[in-house]
Amino acid sequence: MRKIFIINGGQHFAHSGGAFNETLTNWTAAYLQQNNFEVRITDINNPFDAFDEAENFKWADVVIYHTPIWWFQVPNLFKKYIDEVFTAGHQNGIYANDGRSRTNPEINYGTGGLMHGKQYMVTSTWNAPDTAFTLEGEFFDQRSVDDGVLFGFHKMNQFTGMKRIDGFHFHDLEKNATPERIENYRIQYLTHLENKFQTVNTQNHENLSHSNA
């Protein structure tokens, strides 16, 4: 799987300039390009054509989303992007329908996606420290980012047929964003990419081997 579509969801708004997600997008693109992946990038702050963006989803083997979390959701412009692009992808490569039949509408909801064989990964950036998710009595009740705030985001991608690659979450980026922490995060994240995309390459090689057998 060599084609990677990166979406920078770091909206410019009020005191949030989206600088870290832009940096993160650059880290991701540089790593992938250095390892001979084909890369396309969309910044949700720029004007876009929804049908052109749907073509990027159809082109990609893997979609990587970079998003901050605002009020426990993705930014409003990123949500608008998703709404418009996925609508443009209705019966156009992203999803056909909700998967149910009129003869038995009680079952199979969420199985009408058209992006089977593709994968996605999401990173999120937070003011909240990681301990807000892990310590007893802290704000998120020991519920992880993926099983809590991003649960619906993961279901959205499952609805299209895509499979999840484990993501990476960056914490405490307002009160404690020291140069040392950012550099440590960079090293950890690049290691994460190496681990995950070596796996992607291995799976792709195995698929090619089976198809040529």
Image: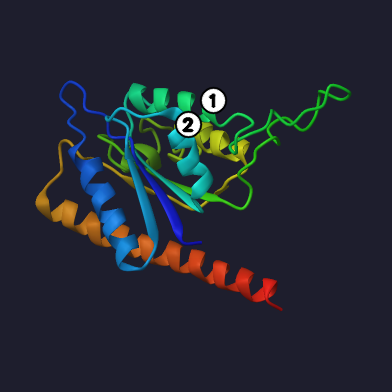
Q: Number of callouts in the render?
A: 2
Q: In which quarter of the view is residue 170 placed?
A: top left
Which numbered dot is residue 51?
Answer: 2
In the image, is 133 to the left or to the right of 157? left
What is the x, y in percent for residue 116?
64, 48
Vertical placement of residue 195 versus 165, above or below: below
The structure residue drawn at horizontal position 45% and vertical position 56%, both measured from the top left corner, is: 3
Residue 12 on image: x %, y %: 21, 27
Q: Residue at x 46, y 61 (%)?
A: 2
Q: Label for residue 118?
A: none
Residue 75 visible somewhere in the drawing: no
Circle 2/circle 1 CB separation < 8 Å? no
Q: Residues within 10 Å of mark 2 (few under 14, many from 20)?
A: some
Q: Which kind of residue does numbered mark 2 sit on?
A: Phe
Q: Position of residue 91 (x, y in %)?
A: 64, 31
Instruction: Name above or below for residue 195 compared with residue 135.
Output: below
Label ID, residue 87: 1
Please name whichever residue, 27 or 153, is drawn nearer the observer in this view of the structure: 27
How far apart are the alpha carbons under marks 2 and 1?
Answer: 9 Å
Q: Are there few (<14), some (14-19), or many (20+) residues within 10 Å of tag 1?
A: some
Residue found farthest to the right: 103
Which residue type carries mark 1?
A: Thr
Element at badge 1?
Answer: helix
Q: Position of residue 190 (x, y in %)?
A: 30, 61
Q: Nearer the viewer, residue 19 or 36?
A: 36
Between 143 and 88, which is closer to the camera in this rendering? 88
Q: Nearer the viewer, residue 105 or 139?
A: 105
Could you tell me which quadrant the C terminus lies in? bottom right
Report if residue 211 is visible in the image.
yes
